[in-house]
């Protein structure tokens, strides 16, 4: 009885809606008495909607009761793995099972195992020697003891005071290295629009100075972490981060962009940054071309100048976006910092200051090479907090090493077909179409690659083709391709650049710089979409009520 076993977190139905109908036929009473609840993902919500609606009618206070009661067993509906389930590709099936079954299940196990060990430690208990055939709380039985598959519970990012890096403090590092002018005007490069849009995760905002705050509300000062969204800030003017074996500060001024080397050789840094920012590609003509193709982009472009696509190290980019799967920006940054610290090389210690005035240091590390990652086992990576992504890292590392390492990825830069590059990248573990297109666009010069998520699909539906989804309820392979083609047909060979500019305009941190009428259109469309969903839901509810009557 799942209701009596609080260790049961979820029941997975492995045959899609067919299995869900069979399950509900036999266990609908468990939904009605509140022991079972549908998982929050779209497929589970659709497949179990009738059961949940009957449960709410039988128990009107069900949602309220559930909100205050732990121990509910979640029912998750996943696509069948049989080739006959052709509605989903193999990659989609694999991603769904790993994201909604294997990954959460392993994290639950790590959490449970950690709580058991913590309880034993606090109680001063030691594990007695096991007799043959006797099981312990760790679930181990048999003739000889075996190690637990998890060495320690999953680490979580700390939630201490916000740490700030001050420009005046950075000035004490390598003071002999002066600021260098990249000699690039704002129309060609604005780091504030390029480093804060989710294509890279290695740059830290630098506060211009320590200011007295009479109101005690530092969060409202421009350029500080308090005024940013998870993606960054549109009004920051300085960043610091590791770039290869260097540590570089980037400073945006009203007329140009400056750089200063804090660690590593100064010689060659201008060329490296020129390649990193892809300054060989003139941006102003592209803005003009895109504006002639899209009236809405023409209104956005003057407000967000200098938004470029980066040319990152492809190995770093590949592993970074594997870590980004089902994750948020702060946690992605934390995971990659842990990976750098464990397997990268130490570069420099930056002076820091917390919001409550405590001075400290922040160590920066280079990104691990394939060789240094060869020492990492799956358990080691799980202990860094990577969870189910640890297996992806290990499997991708091994496959990439077997295919030639970094040289294989660098060879994809010369490919003429972004879709062919996507096909090659999706052969790596944990890499679906979106991650593949992110790596292709942000590190492999595949300018026609269009990473599509729900936000990009919304842009396509709102501005280009409201029928792009068709009858599909999610981003199927066909819909994914159709959305990308809408951008490619409109913006040409560098459609990925134009797509990124439009994506940046949707970020909350950039709303203040947009024209009020553009922001108003965004809000109005969102409200219409929500109203349409409510109306559709009401129609279905009325139809079901009529059938049941």
Image (cartoon, rainbow, N blue to C red):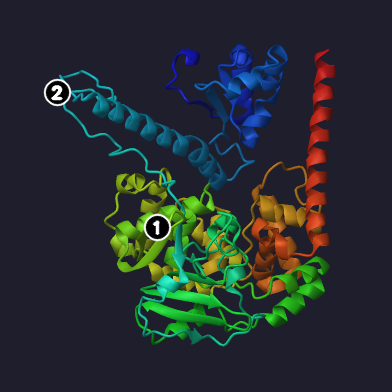
Between 222 and 521, the one nearer to me in the picture: 222
Residue 312 appears left or right of 469? left
Q: Residue at x 59, y 85 (%)?
A: 184
Asked if the residue under mark 2 is in contact with the one under mark 1, i.e. CB atoms within 8 Å, the reply is no
Q: Residues within 10 Å of mark 2 (few under 14, many from 20)?
A: few
Q: Position of residue 526 (x, y in %)?
A: 78, 48
Q: Residue at x 41, y 86 (%)?
A: 268
Quadrant including the C terminus: top right
Q: Dot 2: what SS? A: loop
Mark-to-mark CA distance, 1 and 2? 39 Å
Q: Is residue 138 above or below residue 427?
A: above
Q: Quadrant of residue 128?
A: top left
Q: Position of residue 449 (x, y in %)?
A: 62, 65
Residue 3 appears left or right of 158? right
Q: Sequence order check: which comes first, mark 1 or mark 2?
A: 2
Between 498 and 505, the one nearer to me in the picture: 505
Residue beneath label 1, please?
337
Q: Residue at x 28, y 22 (%)?
A: 137
> In this rendering, does residue 428 appear at all?
no
Between 156 and 435, the one nearer to me in the picture: 156
Residue 237 appears left or right of 428? right
Instruction: State how many labels appear.
Output: 2
Residue beneath label 2, please?
129
Q: Residues within 10 Å of mark 1 (few under 14, many from 20)?
A: many
Q: Position of residue 60 (x, y in %)?
A: 71, 16
Q: Position of residue 170 (x, y in %)?
A: 41, 73
Q: Dot 1: what SS? A: helix
Q: Which mark is residue 345?
A: none
Residue 343 appears left or right of 431? left
| 1 or 2: mark nearer the eye | 1
């Amino acid at each position: 009885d799942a209701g009596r076993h609080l260790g049961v977190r979820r029941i997975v139905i492995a045959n899609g809606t067919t299995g869900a109908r069979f399950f509900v036929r036999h266990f609908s009473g468990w939904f009605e008495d509140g022991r079972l609840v549908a998982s929050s993902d779209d497929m589970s919500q659709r497949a179990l909607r009738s059961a949940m609606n009957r449960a709410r009618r039988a128990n009107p206070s069900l949602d309220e009761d559930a909100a205050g009661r732990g121990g509910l067993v979640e029912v998750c509906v996943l696509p069948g793995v049989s080739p006959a389930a052709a509605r989903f590709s193999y990659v989609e099936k694999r991603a769904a099972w790993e994201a909604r079954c294997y990954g959460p299940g392993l994290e639950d196990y790590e959490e449970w195992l950690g709580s058991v060990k913590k309880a034993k430690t606090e109680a001063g208990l030691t594990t007695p020697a096991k007799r043959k055939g006797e099981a312990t709380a760790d679930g181990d039985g048999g003739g000889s003891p075996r190690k637990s598959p998890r060495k320690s519970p999953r680490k979580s990012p700390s939630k201490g005071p916000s740490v700030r890096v001050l420009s005046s403090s950075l000035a004490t590092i390598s003071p002999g290295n002066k600021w260098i002018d990249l000699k690039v005007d704002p129309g060609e490069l604005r780091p504030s629009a390029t480093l804060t849009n989710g294509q890279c995760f290695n740059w830290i905002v630098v506060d211009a100075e320590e200011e007295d705050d009479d109101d005690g509300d530092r969060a409202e000062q421009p350029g500080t972490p308090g005024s940013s969204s998870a993606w960054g800030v549109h009004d920051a003017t300085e960043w610091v981060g590791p770039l290869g074996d260097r540590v570089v500060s980037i400073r945006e001024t009203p007329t140009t962009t400056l750089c200063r080397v804090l660690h590593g050789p100064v010689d060659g840094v201008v060329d490296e940054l020129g390649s990193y920012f892809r300054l060989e590609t003139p941006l102003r003509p592209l803005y003009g071309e895109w504006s002639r193709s899209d009236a809405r982009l023409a209104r956005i472009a003057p407000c967000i100048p200098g938004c470029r696509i980066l040319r990152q190290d492809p190995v770093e980019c590949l592993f970074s976006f594997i870590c980004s799967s089902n994750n948020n920006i702060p946690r992605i940054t934390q995971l990659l910092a842990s990976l750098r610290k464990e397997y990268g090389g130490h570069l420099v210690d930056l002076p820091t200051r917390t919001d409550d005035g405590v001075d400290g240091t922040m160590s920066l590390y280079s990104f691990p090479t394939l060789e240094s990652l060869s020492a990492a086992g799956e358990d080691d990576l799980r202990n860094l907090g990577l969870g189910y992504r640890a297996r992806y890292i290990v499997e991708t590392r091994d496959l990439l090493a077997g295919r030639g390492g970094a040289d294989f990825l660098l060879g994809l830069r010369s490919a003429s077909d972004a879709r062919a590059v996507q096909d090659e990248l999706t052969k790596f573990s944990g890499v679906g179409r979106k991650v593949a297109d992110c790596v292709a666009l942000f590190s492999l010069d595949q300018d026609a690659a269009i990473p599509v998520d729900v936000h990009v699909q919304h842009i396509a539906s709102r501005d280009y083709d409201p029928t792009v989804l068709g009858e599909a309820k999610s981003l199927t392979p066909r819909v994914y391709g159709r959305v990308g083609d809408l951008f490619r047909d409109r913006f040409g060979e560098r459609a990925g650049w134009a797509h990124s500019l439009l994506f940046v305009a949707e970020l909350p941190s950039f709303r203040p710089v947009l024209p009020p009428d553009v922001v108003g259109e965004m809000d109005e469309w969102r409200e219409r979409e929500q109203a349409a969903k409510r109306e559709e839901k009401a129609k279905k509810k009325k139809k079901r009520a009529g059938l049941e009557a």
